[in-house]
């Protein structure tokens, strides 16, 4: 079963990176270094991320409409979220609580006094043609997330990262990070604020230019949205990826967002600049848009870093602009300047009174904060004796960690559970593109199946087939084994018949065994397994085979 | 024998008759519509009449009265609503082409409150487009005339509501006041108008002009009706986050003709240049009346008054520029047809849908909020606003209420100021500060000035102290007999007198054949 660990190469950079909560991989520092990112020796990459996460409140931020995804267009709307004349917003307290919860999980200061502002711009998907957002008094400020530093870009210099503490040893708040207890990068969180989501424009035809009409769906308009802005403390595209996965894990853990990039409930814009190593001034930055998956974030930033470094090497200047990540072509292209020249004319939202955030409320939210990925990782290591690698991967997703713990509580060996969760379960989730909450297999089901292996009812190999069936149908392992006749052959007479056949058909290997080449036994056992479609108990088959060969002498 | 038509009465007088069973709500509503039919072609106070629905509501009210259930002072009483108050199923235009056919699927909180009281909504009144103006000349549809002199404006922006009350086309009306839009037309039309403390009346369903200044309030024939309407509309509304959750009093308990010992502040800045002599002399008389009643005059100073107008014309347009952004042709209201793309469509929709004054204020506000100007204009204006609040706090340490003219002039002629926005803005010079500092203000008739046009007296109170100004206004009204005479529709074309309706009416003063009257 330990072979599943090497099978974790499946996980690295593979599968559904757009992120449905499956296990994701980690910084493989040695691999990075061997790839030789020479540009990072001369140049330093400076990245800051702006993440938008839709909140999992039942109702919208300023009205009572449902936030459920996937309803018929314009069915979750009312005069308020449609911006009809004379209507007024009322703040959803839950949304504020979720933002505070996020701030606490990200080690932020929670404002005592906060307010909403109007961000004014015309767009058909914005019902009021202004967005209620927060400008100068966000709910949360000055937090941080620690992630393992990408050691391939560490210069080791003291001013390598203004906010980070490269070289500092310690555990990370992040989950699923395999860098061991290596250097930590502290990514400071500048602010977390609340705002309202816009609707969705659907353009008829191939593109907006040829389109003869557009349709607006305002179901999404007014869903609470949280903007999480990092300081420019990220030093490589890989770190951006890890920061994002860590952030997503935290948001999912605390239950404020489902962070589904494919449904748009998590979005990310990136600011990136490069500068010669040792320089303390920032270079001209570009803003990257259309980063629609975690992989796109990393790839887009890698492209952009290389493009900017090339430009500097050629003695050219980097232009400050917004660029669009073209996924198909794998390049970034400048967006029309018209789209970026905005004066949002922020001013305090007069329809809402400023919020005084009571400290008792904040403390209550803090007390109710669930265990965060970092703490849970530590606990899984301590309580279940898991290696750091396993604990890291498993705690990257709360659902996965819940699954693991529920199963491990019902089974004797947590490491075996961990192997199955990281191996077969993750593989099947990745292949199906599903979230663990969407598949019928239960932690108890897995535990029962593992017990069947222990009892000798099925072999480890058969178990994989059984688990696949459980994964898709939710049936109990015992039932599957019975239905498909997968019960291990443990009857000596039945096995001996087959063994005799194998001995008769393989005189060469039999002779090898007689000559003391013990490896040939493995081959003969394999033949027995083949003839029984894997149903032979391997230990029993080996013993009987040895006995038979002994007798035959 | 003098007989008075039902539509000429106050709400409280009609209520007494209703509960005694002497008249029905249907009688009142029919009398109101007869009057509307008679004078509306010349007054033009209404944008929309809701005759059928009103008659049904009147019959419901009569049923309520007959059963003696849930009968309040406004049960069966006709109310006119300024057409920026949303009414479910009834078009709400803000006197703007851009909302000309907009029918809201919801009612303003005040409308629901009135309906719960059993009031009868008779129609929607004209205003300056989106309440931006002081004369109704900025209405996208037509100009309302002053019932005292048809060649003059009724004031604005609640000019339709003020004129309708003055011309007895309704019993009471609601208006909205962002910089004087209830008090100034009340003054010009010789009726009572109250702007409550910001936060007293829910703004939910009031089409926003300047959110931090807008308040809804009553326009009535006397102070008692004003208190009665306040009782119906004041109160906390969870749908309006700026509405204040507190105990609101029964405003009729302040209707005592007793001001002995009350100190009234006379702000010296309000009696300087720009105040017409005829208005000044009417106000001087009012001051004498208060002194005779035993109130004590105190000179107070509001030193930052000279900045109030400039402050207002930064804050209000800034908020308006954002509030009016939603009228883009995408979701409801007017849409310019046949445009090549949505950007052009929105641009043309707004160009064609908004009038000149609305565009002027949107541009002013957009400019004031623009990056590079925000600190110098909008932020500075907010700071001056704070100074104005301090002015009032200091003044209210010396007095119980502040007394001033409502407007520096009597109603001006239609067309007189329309090409000079600044002189139009100056007609609100005494009223705008109350909105900036959120205090309540009432305008009551205090005699007549030039050309026998009514003059309004403004009383300003402390935050949430409507009680004191209602009490002072009531005492003054009792002492002076209120407006006394009723408007005569001066300048009316003879052929339009009610003779042309085939009965022996006498210009609206007497009994109209067959109609119910009360003697
Ligand atoms: Zn809604």
Image (cartoon, rainbow, N blue to C red):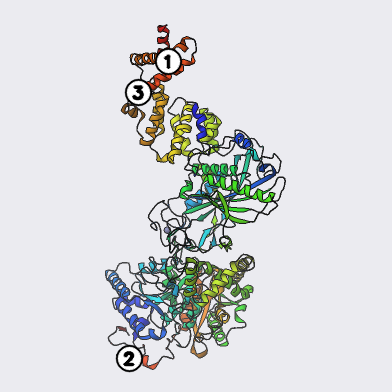
Residue A383 in sight here: yes
Q: Residue under circle 2?
A: B500
- Spatial distance from mark 1 to mark 3, Cα to Cα? 18 Å
Q: Are marks 3 and 2 in contact (CB under 8 Å)?
A: no
Which residue is painted at 39% across and 26% down in the image?
A462
Residue drawn at the location 47% of the way across and 66% of the way down: B342
Q: Nearer the viewer, mark 1 or mark 3?
A: 1
Circle 1 residue: A542
Where is residue A515? Give x, y as percent: 49, 9
Q: Chain of mark 3?
A: A
Mark 1 element type: helix
The answer as to whether the residues below labels 3 and 2 share one chain is no
Q: Give the chain of mark 1.
A: A
Which residue carries the number 3 mark?
Answer: A487
Disc 2 vs disc 1: which is toward the camera? 1
Q: Is residue A338 left or right of residue A314?
A: left
């Amino acid at each position: 079963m330990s072979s599943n660990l090497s099978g974790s190469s499946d996980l690295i950079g593979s599968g559904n990176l757009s992120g449905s909560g499956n296990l994701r991989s980690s910084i493989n520092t040695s691999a990075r270094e061997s790839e030789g990112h020479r540009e990072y020796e001369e140049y330093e990459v400076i990245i800051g991320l702006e993440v938008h996460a839709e909140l999992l409140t039942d109702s919208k931020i300023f009205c009572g409409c449902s936030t459920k995804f996937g309803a018929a267009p314009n069915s979750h709307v009312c005069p308020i979220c449609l911006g009809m004349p004379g209507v007024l917003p009322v703040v959803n307290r839950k949304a504020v609580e979720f933002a505070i919860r996020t701030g606490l999980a990200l080690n932020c200061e929670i404002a005592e006094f906060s307010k909403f502002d109007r961000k004014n711009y015309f767009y058909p998907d914005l019902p009021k043609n202004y967005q209620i957002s927060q400008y100068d008094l966000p709910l949360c400020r000055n937090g941080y997330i620690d992630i393992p530093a990408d050691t391939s870009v560490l210069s080791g210099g003291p001013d390598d990262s203004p906010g980070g503490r490269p070289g500092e040893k310690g555990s990370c708040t992040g989950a699923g990070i395999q860098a061991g207890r290596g250097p930590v990068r502290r990514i400071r969180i500048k602010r977390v604020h609340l705002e309202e989501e816009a609707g969705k424009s659907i353009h008829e035809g191939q593109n907006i230019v040829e389109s003869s009409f557009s349709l607006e769906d305002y179901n999404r308009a007014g869903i609470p949205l949280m903007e999480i802005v990092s300081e420019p403390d990220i030093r490589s595209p890989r770190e951006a990826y890890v920061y994002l996965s860590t952030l997503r894990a935290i948001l999912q853990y605390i239950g404020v967002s489902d962070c589904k990039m494919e449904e748009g409930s998590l979005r990310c814009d990136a600011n990136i600049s490069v500068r010669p190593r040792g320089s303390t001034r920032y270079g001209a930055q570009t803003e990257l848009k259309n980063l629609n998956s975690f992989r796109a974030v990393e790839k887009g930033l890698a492209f952009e870093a290389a493009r900017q470094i090339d430009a500097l090497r050629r003695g050219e200047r980097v232009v400050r602009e917004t660029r669009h990540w073209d996924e198909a072509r794998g390049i970034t292209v400048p967006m029309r300047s018209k789209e970026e020249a905005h004066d949002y004319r922020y001013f305090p939202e007069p329809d809402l009174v400023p919020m005084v955030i009571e400290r008792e409320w904040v403390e209550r939210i803090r007390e109710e904060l669930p265990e965060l990925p970092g703490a849970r990782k530590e606990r899984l290591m301590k309580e279940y004796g898991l290696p750091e690698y396993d604990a890291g991967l498993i705690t990257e997703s709360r659902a996965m960690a819940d699954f693991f713990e529920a199963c491990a509580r019902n089974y004797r060996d947590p490491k075996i559970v961990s192997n199955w969760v990281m191996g077969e379960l993750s593989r099947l989730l990745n292949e199906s593109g599903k979230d663990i909450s969407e598949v019928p297999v239960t932690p108890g089901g897995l535990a029962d199946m593992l017990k069947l292996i222990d009892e000798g009812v099925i072999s480890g190999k058969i178990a994989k087939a059984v688990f696949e069936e459980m994964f898709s149908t939710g049936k109990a392992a015992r039932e599957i084994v019975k239905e498909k006749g997968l019960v291990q052959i443990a009857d000596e007479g039945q096995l001996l018949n087959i063994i005799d056949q194998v001995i008769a058909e393989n005189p060469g290997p039999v002779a090898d065994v007689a000559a003391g080449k013990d490896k040939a036994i493995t081959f003969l056992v394999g033949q027995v397994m083949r003839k029984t479609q894997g149903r032979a108990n391997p230990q029993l088959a080996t013993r009987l085979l040895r006995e038979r060969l002994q007798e035959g002498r | 024998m003098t007989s008075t038509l039902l539509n000429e009465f106050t709400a409280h007088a009609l209520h007494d008759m209703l509960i005694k069973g002497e008249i029905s709500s249907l009688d009142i509503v029919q009398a109101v519509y007869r009057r509307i039919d008679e004078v509306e072609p010349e007054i033009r106070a209404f944008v929309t009449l809701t005759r059928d629905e009103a008659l049904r509501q009147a019959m419901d009210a009569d049923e309520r009265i007959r059963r003696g259930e849930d009968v309040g002072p406004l049960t069966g009483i006709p109310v006119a609503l300024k057409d920026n108050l949303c009414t479910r199923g009834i078009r709400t235009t803000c006197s703007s082409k851009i909302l000309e056919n907009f029918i809201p699927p919801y009612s303003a909180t005040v409308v629901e409150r009135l309906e719960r009281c059993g009031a009868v909504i008779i129609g929607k009144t004209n205003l300056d487009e989106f309440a931006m103006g002081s004369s109704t000349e900025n209405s996208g549809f037509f100009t309302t005339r002053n019932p005292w002199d048809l060649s003059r404006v009724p004031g604005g922006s609640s000019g339709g509501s003020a004129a309708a009350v003055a011309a007895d086309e309704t019993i009471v009306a609601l208006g909205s006041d962002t910089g004087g839009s209830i008090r100034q037309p009340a003054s010009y039309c010789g009726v009572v108008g109250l702007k409550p403390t910001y936060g007293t009346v829910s703004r939910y369903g009031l089409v926003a002009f300047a959110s931090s200044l807008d308040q809804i309030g009553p326009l009535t024939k006397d102070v008692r009706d004003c208190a009665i309407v306040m009782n119906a509309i004041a109160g906390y509304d969870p749908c309006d986050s700026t509405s204040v959750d507190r105990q609101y009093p029964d405003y009729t308990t302040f209707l005592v003709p007793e001001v002995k010992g009350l100190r009234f502040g006379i702000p010296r800045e309000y009696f300087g240049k720009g105040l017409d002599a005829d208005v000044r002399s009417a106000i001087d008389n009012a001051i004498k009346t208060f002194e005779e009643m035993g109130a004590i005059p105190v000179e107070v100073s509001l030193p930052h008054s000279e900045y109030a107008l400039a402050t207002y014309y930064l804050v209000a347009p800034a908020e308006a520029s954002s509030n009016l952004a939603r009228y883009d042709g995408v979701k409801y209201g007017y849409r310019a047809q046949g445009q090549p793309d949505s950007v052009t469509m929105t641009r043309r929709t707004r160009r064609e849908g908004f009038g000149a004054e609305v565009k002027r204020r949107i541009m002013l506000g957009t400019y004031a909020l623009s990056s590079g100007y925000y600190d110098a204009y909008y932020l500075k204006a907010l700071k001056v606003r704070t100074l104005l609040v301090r002015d009032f706090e200091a003044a209210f340490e010396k007095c119980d209420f502040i007394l001033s003219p409502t407007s520096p002039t009597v109603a001006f002629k239609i067309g007189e100021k329309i090409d000079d926005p600044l002189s139009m803005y100056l007609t609100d010079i005494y009223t705008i500060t109350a909105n900036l500092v959120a205090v309540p203000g009432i305008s009551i008739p205090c005699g007549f000035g030039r050309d026998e046009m009514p003059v309004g007296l403004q009383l300003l109170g402390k935050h949430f102290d409507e009680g004191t100004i209602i009490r002072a206004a009531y005492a003054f009204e009792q002492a002076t007999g209120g407006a006394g005479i009723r408007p005569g529709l001066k300048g009316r074309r003879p052929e339009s007198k009610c003779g042309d309706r085939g009965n022996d009416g006498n210009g609206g003063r007497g009994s109209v054949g067959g109609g119910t009257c009360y003697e």
